[in-house]
Image: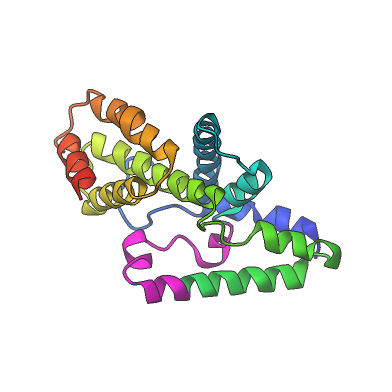
Amino acid sequence: MGIHTYFRSLNELERIIRCPGKFKFEEHSVSAHSWKVVQYAKTLADIEERNGVSIDWKKLYEITSSHDYGEIFIGDIKTPVKHSSKELRLLIQQVEEGMIEYFIEENIPEEFKAIFRKQLREGKDNSVEGLILEVADKMDQVYEAFAELQRGNTEKEFIVMYRNALVKIKNIQLKCVDYFLEHILPDMVKEETPSSIDIKKITEEALAL
């Protein structure tokens, strides 16, 4: 019981592998994903600040570092399944939030429960910080899928993941998204690799949607 239980549970995120059931040249754990999302988010937030946007950094670090904690209870559900319908996505979110609430009630001392509820909540919303989290989360999907496509991984799921993540990113109205599309993504696509998959074509098709 107590906060020790929370700290101890973090080890489980190292053992949950993203995109389960598919061949991958490189596997990524949920904890590694969460760390990368924080790194993307802080740079994206810096870009926003350079464009005059005010950032709540405490909120940003809270929601980005904890955004996938609920996967301790439900694992990593494949993106095509999770987002196959709004109803299913909502049900999954309700189950995840319910299990987090139960964990907090059973394990966290009373004086810290409100803090944990705030930190482990669903952080993706229409605030600047919530939108940055959304972009950062999708960026990691882009990079993970891109690395697999570069190596010639022909699993269709990685093409779908790459394309869908790009479509989601480009439809979010932030200055950092403009920067990503104008500067970062072109550098990524320009990388010379002997791949049988036409990543440039897939990218152009996604951006045209």
Q: Does residue 152 appear anywhere in the picture?
A: yes
What residue is drawn where x is 42% and y is 43%?
140
Q: Is residue 135 magenta?
A: no
* Image quadrant where one finds the N terminus: bottom right
Horizontal and vertical percent position of residue 97: 58, 70
What residue is drawn where x is 53% and y is 48%?
128
Q: Is residue 184 left or right of residue 190?
A: right
Quick one: 1 or 191, which is closer to the camera? 191
Quick one: 54 or 61, which is closer to the camera? 54
Q: Which residues are magenta?
A: 69-91
Horizontal and vertical percent position of residue 158: 27, 49
Q: Is residue 1 above or below residue 155?
A: below
Q: Is residue 151 left or right of residue 19?
A: left
Q: Quadrant of residue 67?
A: bottom right
Q: Quadrant of residue 102?
A: bottom right
Q: Quadrant of residue 152?
A: top left
Q: Does residue 14 appear anywhere in the picture?
A: no
| Main secondary-structure element of the magenta-colored stretch | helix
Quick one: 52 or 26, which is closer to the camera? 52
